[in-house]
Image (tube, coloured by chain):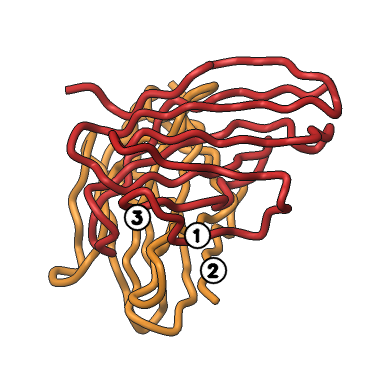
Amino acid sequence: AQSVAQPEDQVNVAEGNPLTVKCTYSVSGNPYLFWYVQYPNRGLQFLLKYITGDNLVKGSYGFEAEFNKSQTSFHLKKPSALVSDSALYFCAVREGSGYSTLTFGKGTMLLVSP
Amino acid sequence: DAGVTQSPTHLIKTRGQQVTLRCSPISGHKSVSWYQQVLGQGPQFIFQYYEKEERGRGNFPDRFSARQFPNYSSELNVNALLLGDSALYLCASSFDRGLGNTIYFGEGSWLTVV
């Protein structure tokens, strides 16, 4: 069975500093990895995905993520955080077999202070 | 272009009642999935429909059912509501069931069971 772990409930960073939100995954086949962001009382917004190819994936709003197969990780990064980046971030995985549902982590709250 | 649209946005029901939630996918998308997000947790997969057939079902009781219509819109029904069914119900769509396809989410329907 596929699973996702987001080890940090909350990440605090000052505006202008780089941020990293961690994600590790477990699948038996090839992983398809996604990051979503959720603002208060809203649905999920797609940020980026890794399917194959370059391990560094660039997405919306200046976010990027690095796929590391040996460490089974897919950490979300941004070089310079904005206060408006404060939100709940979810990592999700789809496995390269079976039907194509998403399995989510429990989420990481990102708080960017001015 | 319109995104995934869901209705109603908020509703309050009494224990034992039944509820129907509706979803219209992005134009051209044939796959619709439903997820339940309980406060403080990541979304949990309920159903996936593709070409009007159920293609996957998560670990939810038979009180939960869904269907997809010829226009690819979908309904989620929950019978005999319990307090624990209080959650954000998210509908998601993708072009088809391809693993690399991005899954786009709606704003959700907030269900409160009292």
Q: Earlier in the sequence, mark 3 or mark 2?
A: 2
The image position of residue A59, as x and y in percent, is 21, 45
> Do the numbered discs 1 and 2 sit on residues whose CB atoms are within 8 Å?
yes
At which x and y percent is residue B100? 23, 61
Q: Which shade is chain A?
A: orange
Which of the two discs, 1 and 2, labels the residue nearer the N terminus?
A: 2
**Spatial separation of the CA atoms under disc 1 and disc 2:** 6 Å
Q: Amino acid at mark 3?
A: Phe
Judging depth in this view, the residue of A29 and B76 nearest the camera is B76
- Determine if marks 3 and 1 fall on one subunit: yes
Quadrant of the frame with the N terminus of chain B: top left
Local secondary structure at mark 2: strand
Identify residue for label 2.
A3
The C terminus of chain B lies in which quarter of the figure? Answer: top right
Judged left or right of residue A74, residue A6 is: right
Q: CA distance from mark 3 to mark 1?
A: 10 Å
Give the quarter of the image for residue A99. bottom left
- Above or below, A46 against B23 in this view is below
Alpha-carbon span between mark 3 and mark 2: 13 Å
As drawn, the residue found furthest toward the left would be A53
Q: Are marks 3 and 1 in contact (CB under 8 Å)?
A: no
Q: Mark 1 — residue?
A: A103
Q: Residue at x 50, y 33 (%)?
A: B75
Rate crowding at label 1 as few (under 14), some (14 to 19) or many (20 or more) other CA atoms within 10 Å: many
The residue labelled by disc 3 is A34
Q: Which mark is residue B91?
A: none
- Badge 2 amino acid: Ser
What shade has chain B been given?
red
